[in-house]
Amino acid sequence: MPPKLPSPFYPLIVFLALALLFLHSSLLSSPNAQRKDLSRPTPSCDLFNGRWVQDLGKPPRPLYDETCPFHRNAWNCLRNQRDNMGAINSWKWVPRDCVLERIDPPRFLTLMRNRNIGFVGDSLNENFLVAFLCALRTADSEAKKWKRKGAWRGAYFPKFNVTVAYHRAVLLAKYEWKPRQSGPDGEVKGIYRVDVDVPADDWAHIGDFYHVLIFNTGHWWGPDKFPKETPLVFYQEGKPILPAVEMLDGLKAVLQNMAIHIHRAFPNSILKFWRLQSPRHFHGGDWNQNGSCIFNKPLEESEILRPEQLDMWFDPSNDGINKEARLLNGLIKDAIQGSHIRVLDLTHLSEFRADAHPAIWLGKKDAVQVWGQDCMHWCLPGVPDTWVDILAQSIRHSLRN
């Protein structure tokens, strides 16, 4: 039987198939398509549920050391000769349901080429930033300090045209000192006016510069920062909120308004995270009450980590001594529900690590006498490097999808 001759429609079918394939590839590679991909959800993978495992062999060395030019002195625990640094960095966070990869700085910066990352919030986000900068510098030794666009500090990586910076806004909302005012409890030294519906100038207009933003607040919302003689007084639409509200209700109003502002003012093409609370580990008193955190190991070290010891510290139902972290997390989750802001829940994994704070090793002779031990910020290298791994993997998955 002679072979069948090709159908006269065969060349047309081939042409149409190739044209559709070319059009599909073009759409995927366009800049607009890349920015749109940022708003897609990450794969189903819970990086926040797991346990700390110690490598008793040869644990991987930190990506950076005390010579990183982006260090902040009080967190540079290697240079300050904090005890037990080798043990602190021998613990690895292992999620239960997926694999957490260590950041690969050259690969990550290549992925982020021509994009910028911004941290907004208090000094715990700055702590996070420093770990990020020091890790990324291993891929670009020409990285330079960067402080523009209202940023508090940051770095520019010229090899990849990437900027990573921090905008200090401890309450997120705009606040200012007003001396000799009448407060909720009568005449006071002065008040801090907080406009719950107005973002702080430091970050209100940065949406046209960043492709990824990480927000946080929480550590300044307490009577140690704003006592009764210099209280927070809350305003909305330019007028005092009456009757006057307590700090917790003021925080709720700020969280709700800032979440709305972020959702509305910043386009969906910007990948937005809200980092939940970094737990404090003051034992025997707060920072100004001789609180201490000189621990040699995480709060639990058994093969199967149990929550009981953590709950003694943090569970509101047990009236934990540091229960505020979990209470604030609930308020934050409520505020951002339904928005395009993603939760970066680093609280639970950090709760174990009472051993990893600067404590008394602060780099200045009289720092402990003046400020007390630091059981709030983290040694670097240390726990924030795990935060960096989680953030990098979350960003990478979003872009790759």
Image (spheres, grey):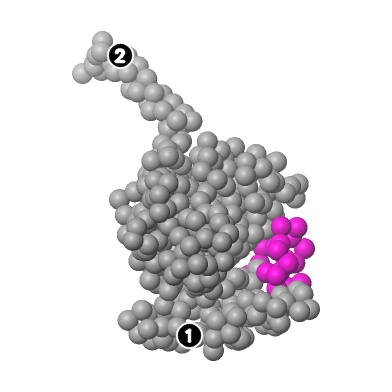
> Circle 1 sits in a helix, a strand or a loop, which is it?
loop
Overall secondary structure of the magenta section: loop
What is the x, y in percent for residue 171? Answer: 50, 58
Across and down, in percent, residue 349 comes to 47, 72
Whether 60 is among the magenta residues is yes
Residue 124 seen in render: no
**Tag 1 residue:** 300
* Badge 2 amino acid: Leu
Q: Is residue 13 visible?
A: yes
The numbered mark, 2 or 1, whose residue comes first in the sequence reads: 2
x and y percentages locating residue 1 in the rendered image? 21, 18
- Magenta residues span 59-79
Instruction: Tell me which amino acid carries mark 1.
Output: Glu
Is the residue marked by circle 1 packed among few (<14), some (14-19), or many (20+) residues within 10 Å? some
The picture places residue 173, in percent across and down from the top left corner, at 48, 53
| Image quadrant in which you'd find residue 4 | top left
Q: Which mark is residue 12?
A: 2
* Outermost bottom residue: 284
| In this picture, residue 315 sits left or right of residue 284 | left
For discs 2 and 1, the disc positioned in front in the rendered view: 1
